[in-house]
């Protein structure tokens, strides 16, 4: 697809963060936009804000964990705009688990898997046949370096990081690779893409627990307070790492450029996170210990002090 003008984009998790930024960016390309999210209030606010920018936009309350809800989203998008060209399976639930992975609440696993993995599978199942019939289109699945590259070993709050979130994002990468090959086999022009939002992003994902649905309610009593973005930033700063947020527009730009260039890997320019990929590949090829599974906080702080000529 070389021109997005007049085309239709559907973005799940579109009420906030990266999804909303993608919706706005698509709109500025002249696309018609469907924002889908489980949170009706923020969705309404995001939809109004895009409409105020002059974008042709519809908001559809959708729960990606429920296939009939995603099917209904596809139907409503077709009814409203007559086609769907770009589908962003972007809705996500962040890390909420505490302790070691054998101590994680099973409700955390179910919530993470249902939103981050099954939600993407639902998006593929409901939308890809529509794109195939049209003979063109793009599926963009939002992954993360945390899991897509390797799981972060130690959490931003100090203890072991959640194993739920990276496991789901590793699955998103694998699903998207399969989608790529299956689409190739059909000879279609429909393309699959995997998005790795880079940098430090000021979005709701750090505090997903605020909107935890009752059916995934915790079954174990928490021993530690829930994570907040403010606390994460404070810990990074205390470790000597200066926190600068990457504008969400930068991520949205990567998506538009990636679609126009038919780029499977939607990533920013190479960063230090890429080192994990080479170290992981080297570890596999050498059958060596997985020494790429690092403490991300310490790594950031080390790099920061090196670039500032510090003496750590
Ligand atoms: N923020 C980051 O640093 C970062 C980094 C890498 C990847 N990601 C990924 O980016 C995507 C977007 O997250 P974000 O950072 O913008 O966070 P966000 O919390 O601001 O946005 C996620 C959206 O998904 C929605 N959502 C949650 N459960 C849903 C459900 N069952 N059905 C429909 N919508 C649902 C939420 O209501 C929210 O609006 C996620 O997949 C996340 O894992 C984020």
Image (cartoon, rainbow, N blue to C red):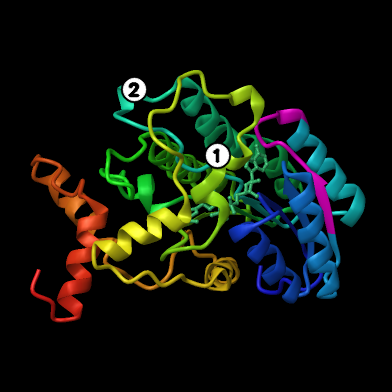
Q: Secondary structure at mark 2?
A: helix
Which residue is under mark 2?
103
Q: Position of residue 249 (x, y in %)?
A: 58, 72
Crowd rating for badge 2 (residues with CA inside 10 Å; few <14, some 14–19, many 20+): few
Q: Quadrant of the C terminus?
A: bottom left
Residue at point 15%, 75% (across, down): 306
User: Vertical placement of 183 versus 112: above or below?
Assistant: below
Q: Secondary structure at mark 1?
A: helix
Asked whether residue 28 is drawn in magenta, I would say no
Q: Position of residue 52 (x, y in %)?
A: 85, 72
User: Vertical placement of 214 versus 265: above or below?
Assistant: above
Q: Nearer the viewer, residue 155 or 128?
A: 155
Q: Quadrant of the N terminus?
A: bottom right
Q: Nearer the viewer, residue 211 or 25?
A: 211
Pointers 1 and 2 in contact (C-beta within 8 Å):
no
Q: Position of residue 171 (x, y in %)?
A: 44, 37
Whole-angstrom CA distance, mark 1 to mark 2, is 18 Å
Q: Nearer the viewer, residue 73 or 306?
A: 306
Q: Nearer the viewer, residue 62 or 29?
A: 62
Which residue is under mark 1?
209
User: Vertical placement of 287 versus 254: above or below?
Assistant: above
Instruction: Give me the disc on residue 201.
Output: none
Give the side of residue 232 with respect to residue 77, left or right. left
Q: Earlier in the sequence, mark 1 or mark 2?
A: 2
Q: Magenta residues?
A: 58-68
Residue at point 64%, 23% (across, down): 215
For label 2, being within 8 Å of ligand 1 is answered no
Residue 130 picture quarter: top right
């Amino acid at each position: 697809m070389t021109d997005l003008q007049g085309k239709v984009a559907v973005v799940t998790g579109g009420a906030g963060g990266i999804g909303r930024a993608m919706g706005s960016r698509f709109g500025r390309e002249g696309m018609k936009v469907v924002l889908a999210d489980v949170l009706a209030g923020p969705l309404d606010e995001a939809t109004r804000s895009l409409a105020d920018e002059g974008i042709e936009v519809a908001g559809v309350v959708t729960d990606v964990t429920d296939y009939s809800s995603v099917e209904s989203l596809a139907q409503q998008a077709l009814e409203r705009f007559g086609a769907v060209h770009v589908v962003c399976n972007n809705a996500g639930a962040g890390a909420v688990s505490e302790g070691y992975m054998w101590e994680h609440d099973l409700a955390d696993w179910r919530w993470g898997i249902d939103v981050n993995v099954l939600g993407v599978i639902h998006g593929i199942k409901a939308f890809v046949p529509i794109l195939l019939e049209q003979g063109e289109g793009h599926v963009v699945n939002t992954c993360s370096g945390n899991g897509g590259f390797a799981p972060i070993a130690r959490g931003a709050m100090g203890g072991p990081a959640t194993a739920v979130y990276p496991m789901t994002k590793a699955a998103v990468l694998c699903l998207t690779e399969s989608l790529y090959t299956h689409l190739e086999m059909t000879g279609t022009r429909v393309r699959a893409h995997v998005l790795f939002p880079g940098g430090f992003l000021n979005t709701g994902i750090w505090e997903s627990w605020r909107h935890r649905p009752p059916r995934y309610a915790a079954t174990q009593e928490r021993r530690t307070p829930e994570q907040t973005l403010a606390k994460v930033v404070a810990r990074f700063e205390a470790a000597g790492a200066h926190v600068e947020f990457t504008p969400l527009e930068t991520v949205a730009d990567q998506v538009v450029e990636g679609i126009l260039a038919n780029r499977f890997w939607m990533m920013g320019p190479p960063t230090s996170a890429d080192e994990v990929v080479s170290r992981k590949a080297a570890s596999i090829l050498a059958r060596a210990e997985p020494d790429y599974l690092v403490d991300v906080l310490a790594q950031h702080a080390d790099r920061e002090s090196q670039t500032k000529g510090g003496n750590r």
